[in-house]
Image (cartoon, rainbow, N blue to C red):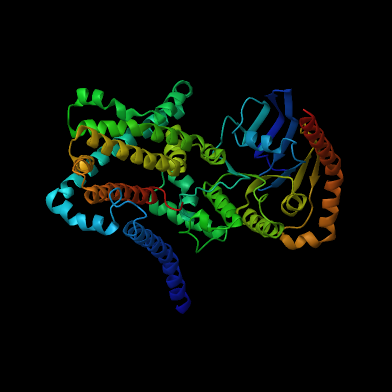
Amino acid sequence: MTTGAATRRRLVWQQLVPIAFGVACLIAVIALLEVLIRAGVINRFIVPTPLDIAGSFGRLIREEHVGERFLLTCYEALGASLLLTVFGIAFGVLLHRLRLVRLATETWIAAMASAPLVLMYPLFLVIFGRSALTIIMMGFVSALPPVILKTLEGLSSTRPVLINVGRSFKLTPSQLYWKILFPSALPTIFVGVRLGMIFALINIVGVEFLINFGGLGQLVNELSERYDLPGTYAAICFVILVSVVFFVVTERIEKWLRPGA
Amino acid sequence: MSAEPLLVVDNIVKRFETPEGTLTAVEGISFNVAPGEFVAVIGPSGCGKSTLFNIIGGLLDEYEGQVSVAGETLRGPHPSIGMIFQEESTFPWRTVIDNVAFPLEIAGMAKAERLEKARHFVELVGLDGFERRYPSELSGGMRQRVSMARTLASQPKILLMDEPFAALDEQTRLLLGDKVLQIQQDLKQTTLLITHNLTEAVQLSDRILVMTYRPGRTKRMVEIKLPRPRSSEIVGSDAFGHYVAQIWSDLREEASKGLKDDEARRGGARRA
């Protein structure tokens, strides 16, 4: 019993120590920045002090409706993420099943991943109007390639012995997909989804910034134009928070869908 | 063995097309396995053992000859044949109990019933207490036992194993051999073992088919008249040593050919 309690305590420590170390490193970096800016090593007209940034959070919440903007950016990111997960995975599965389509399109999709699709925003504005839908579609389209490619990679790299196990149990093609190929590919697919979400968020905030419509991107634009640097950096912190929220949520979903990894 | 054979392998020939030309992997392999019998196929690396495993398991087609199970000619994987693979083949996303219950789930058995049944096979391979663990939390030997329990849960008439303990150390291999012997004796399980390990083959088998190096042909069928029930303790007996020496004298020449061939190929590749 005592050994069990000691083991549990040790496991808790093993989990807590890295978290505590990470937080301590972050605080140390912030403190170092504060010192370097105050000492004049870093120009405070370019980078405001962390204390100034922290001080502007309340102002952003009270005067700039950052809560609503945060939720709007989250909503756009969620919309784009759902679209890219559904269509990206479906297209990846299609490429895995149809060799001809894969050979014909894989290079193009890879090329599309590195193309600056954000520059197509005027076209999207014409098609979808100046609305959240334009921003969602921009995020979706620009984030699709990594999800497709990683889904394809995950399915293709399923260990042949697992497929042979399925064949030896006479699984139907559909059972083989859902019981073996898909669970085996899930970790790689989730890498693609996370990459896609990063691409989507960059494009969503970028387009909000460019078309000056809603969300945190517009706030960053407005604050930088007012030369409110602490506010600008504080708004960027909220963008990072959106990214962290999505990362944590996808990690939880992955653990739920694919335990034991 | 006087009983009607359960498995008949009749004059199997398998050729592969390679960039260097046609490669005959196995040629004219024929043998029978009677119900409850344990037969091993042994041969040097590259003699076509795994090709034979895949043909009997129904994973390879386009070969000459015929494989039949209880009189039924094999066309693809057969529900009466349960396969245990050389490579680690547990599903990492399933717990031990869910891995073992997999074939029962595919058969459409209700959850409570299949878990109950799976528990029996987990106990049979000596993994009780590990039901809720994931494969990543188990040793290599334990994972191989999970694979074995999963295959046994499908209740095959013939257990087909391809060097299932190849990746394990010698001591674990001997102890797992005991487990296989115990299961085979308890279930009267007809078993065909593909291996290159002499000790393992003699420890477990009633008969051993010795194969030649490429193309794999039947060199000799050796009957092992060691008493049953057996355990790994038998490896110290004179009779055991006699069988190992006898089979090695057959195998040595074939293994040497394989080694020379391999060295020639590597030398050729280096020169190129």
Q: Would residue B118 be seen by someone viewing this image from the given angle?
A: yes
Is B18 above or below relative to B196?
Answer: above
Could you tell me which residue is drawn at 24 percent across and 48 percent down?
Answer: A229
Q: Position of residue A218 (x, y in %)?
A: 20, 39
- Name the one closer to the observer, B182 or B211: B211
Q: Residue furthest front?
A: A40
Could you tell me which residue is drawn at 74 percent across and 33 percent down?
Answer: B29
Q: Position of residue A221 (x, y in %)?
A: 22, 40
Q: Is residue B222 left or right of residue A51?
A: right
Q: Would residue A98 be seen by someone viewing this image from the given angle?
A: no
Count of number-bearing discs:
0
Q: Quadrant of residue A85?
A: top left
Is A124 above or below relative to A162?
Answer: above
Q: Position of residue A33 (x, y in %)?
A: 35, 57
- Name the one closer to the observer, A208 or B36: A208
Could you tell me which residue is drawn at 69 percent across and 34 percent down?
Answer: B9
